[in-house]
Image: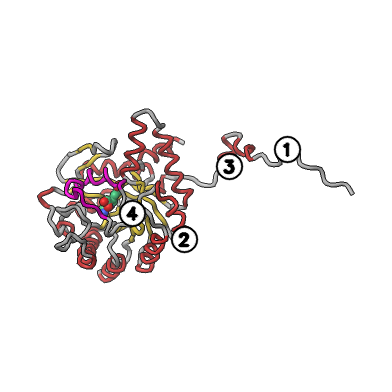
Amino acid sequence: MALPPLPAFPASRPRRLRRDAFTRALVREHHLHASDLILPVFVHDGHDRVQDVPSMPGVQRLSIDRLMGLAEQCVQLGVPVIALFPVIDSALKTPDGREATNPDGLVPRTVRALKANFPQLGVLCDVALDPFTSHGQDGLLDETGYILNDATVAVLTKQALVQADAGVDIVAPSDMMDGRIGAIRGALEGAGHIHTRIMAYSAKYASAFYGPFRDAVGSAANLGKSDKKAYQMDPGNSDEALREVGLDIAEGADMVMVKPGMPYLDIVRRVKDEFRVPTFAYQVSGEYAMLKAAAANGWLDGDAVMMESLLAFKRAGADGVLTYFALDAARKLKQG
Ligand code: PBG
């Protein structure tokens, strides 16, 4: 009995599918779209006021009137959501961060202006106290400097309600206090804000990659040598991320987030596989600064690493990415 002939060497040629652009496009598993992107922006008071953020080349602090131009670009390029981060006048910062609950504060005014001019653009607000506290922490401190959980949650709940009253579409608690998603969801429902979406910063790590952001909102100097390790997660943990995400979903989160992004893609994958809910990743300020700095030195091709890094989030299982590159990437996608 004759044996079937052995296949000619090599038995398999995976390179066939990489031979030309049309085949690569045909078999590509993951794609980046402008609709995957959320643009974080820094807003400050004043008129026609623009300030560069030195540690984030290409990123600026903008007054509300100047922010409108950026919002218009989001609409034109198909970036669906803008995420607001306030730069609060230091005279308004207090130990209890009470400016965070001012219904006429910078954030509610910005939300109203954006929704009046661009109703089709989604607006997301961070819920956390660090832009508003004189010590730069995300919550209220006891006499030892420990961040009080339940007292902080009470303020965060008020902050979220003020944002919802102003018309925000998505509230995004970024503080990592226990129980805050449940408290905020209950308060929103109680106030009739049944459509307000919650994107929970569920697995948020105590990361050194937030450095440039803290420069941008002006909390770095106030924080000084203190850190956020007693509430943000330890970078050594992964199972704990699943526990945090599970709690936030049970408490009423619509969407969850992993942060930072690139060094934590394993967490994105585990969260997506375990829960199958809309999962986002935040490519944070330090990741942006790193790529920008290398590109400025001519060490990396800036556009190429921007697109590759964003596609990697999709491959890891993210449904979308918060990124300071959102407009640049959307422009590049449009060019094809
Ligand atoms: C505030 C907040 C931070 C970021 C988003 N929301 C900083 C922090 O937790 O210290 C970081 C974003 C970035 O680095 O781009 N709680």
Cα–Cα span, label 1 and label 2: 42 Å
Label located before the other in sequence (1 or 3): 1
Q: Which residue is mark 2?
A: 276
Going 41% across and 45% down the picture, which residue do you hit? Answer: 34
Mark closer to the observer (3, 4)? 4
Quick check: is 220 in the magenta stretch?
A: yes
Disc 2 marks which amino acid?
Arg
Q: Are marks 4 and 1 in contact (CB under 8 Å)?
A: no
Asked which secondary structure carries label 3, the reply is: helix
Q: Are marks 3 and 2 in contact (CB under 8 Å)?
A: no
* Label annotation for residue 26: 3
Up/down of 208 relative to 177, above or below: above
Disc 4 marks which amino acid?
Tyr
Pointer 3: residues within 10 angstroms few (<14), some, or many (20+)?
few
Cα–Cα span, label 3 and label 4: 37 Å
Q: Which residue is mark 1?
A: 9
Q: Is residue 14 left or right of residue 183?
A: right
Whole-percent x, y for residue 153 in the image: 23, 65
Disc 1 marks which amino acid?
Phe
As drawn, which residue projects farthest toward the left? 91
Q: Is mark 3 within 8 Å of ligand 1?
A: no
Disc 3 marks which amino acid?
Leu
Whole-percent x, y for residue 185 in the image: 30, 67
Cα–Cα span, label 3 and label 2: 26 Å
Q: Are marks 3 and 4 in contact (CB under 8 Å)?
A: no
Mark closer to the observer (2, 4)? 4
Label located before the other in sequence (3 or 4): 3
Q: Which residue is mark 4?
A: 205
Question: On the image, which quarter does residue 60 sit in?
Answer: top left
Cα–Cα span, label 1 and label 3: 26 Å
Pointer 2: residues within 10 angstroms few (<14), some, or many (20+)?
few
